[in-house]
Image (cartoon, rainbow, N blue to C red):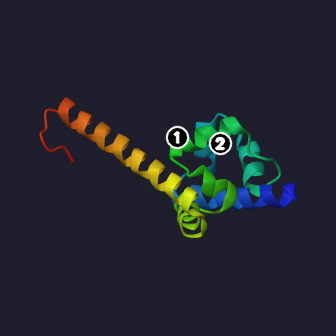
Amino acid sequence: MTEAVNSAVGRRLRNIREMLEVKVMDMADSLEISVGYYRKLERGDHAIRLPLLILLHEIYGIDLNYLITGRAREEDIARDLVCGNPEEMFYLLHRLLNSCEKTYMAHIQEGREHGDKEYC
């Protein structure tokens, strides 16, 4: 099973890299690994280590949930909201609203720092 998972993750990694229009050499350089090792990751010959996953997310904004599972976070959240019990739905909605509030407050603060009354 591990080989199948590595292969699927490698395929998604290659597809994402191609969508981002990043060359193999540039991707390997940014991750500070050899081109050969990077190619092995895309082929699924090796599992991607956690430090590389973190770099992929930090440098390229790659959705790690999608890279690993093939599902976007939004799909998981929607499934949990629709299929979950009322307590789970309440918990997810509560987290979502808290996240919105934090994002909104950070946005307002950023606008104040720029001297804009309505920063958007």
Q: Residue 71 location, x and y as percent? A: 62, 63
Furthest-front residue in view?
86
Choose top left, top right, bottom left or bottom right for residue 7. Answer: bottom right
Residue tagged by mark 2?
53
Residue 89 lies, in percent from the top left, at 53, 60
Residue tagged 1: 59
User: Is residue 19 shown left or right of residue 51?
Assistant: left
Q: Which amino acid is tagged 2?
A: Leu
Q: Is residue 52 left or right of residue 119?
A: right
The residue positioned 76% from the left and 45% from the top of the image is: 36
Q: Position of residue 35 (x, y in %)?
A: 70, 43
Q: CA distance from mark 1 to mark 2?
A: 10 Å
- Which residue is found at the position 83% from the left and 52% from the top? 45
Asked if one can make out residue 34 in the rendered structure from this viewpoint, the answer is yes
Crowd around label 2: few <14 · some 14–19 · many ≥20 (10 Å) = some
Q: Which of 105 and 115 lies nearest the eye of the viewer? A: 105
User: 85 or 82: which is nearer to us?
Assistant: 85
**For the N terminus, which image quadrant?**
bottom right
| 35 relative to 87 in the view: left or right | right
Q: Residue furthest top?
A: 113
Q: Is residue 33 visible?
A: no
Q: Residue at x 65, y 34 (%)?
A: 32
Residue 101, picture quadrant: top left
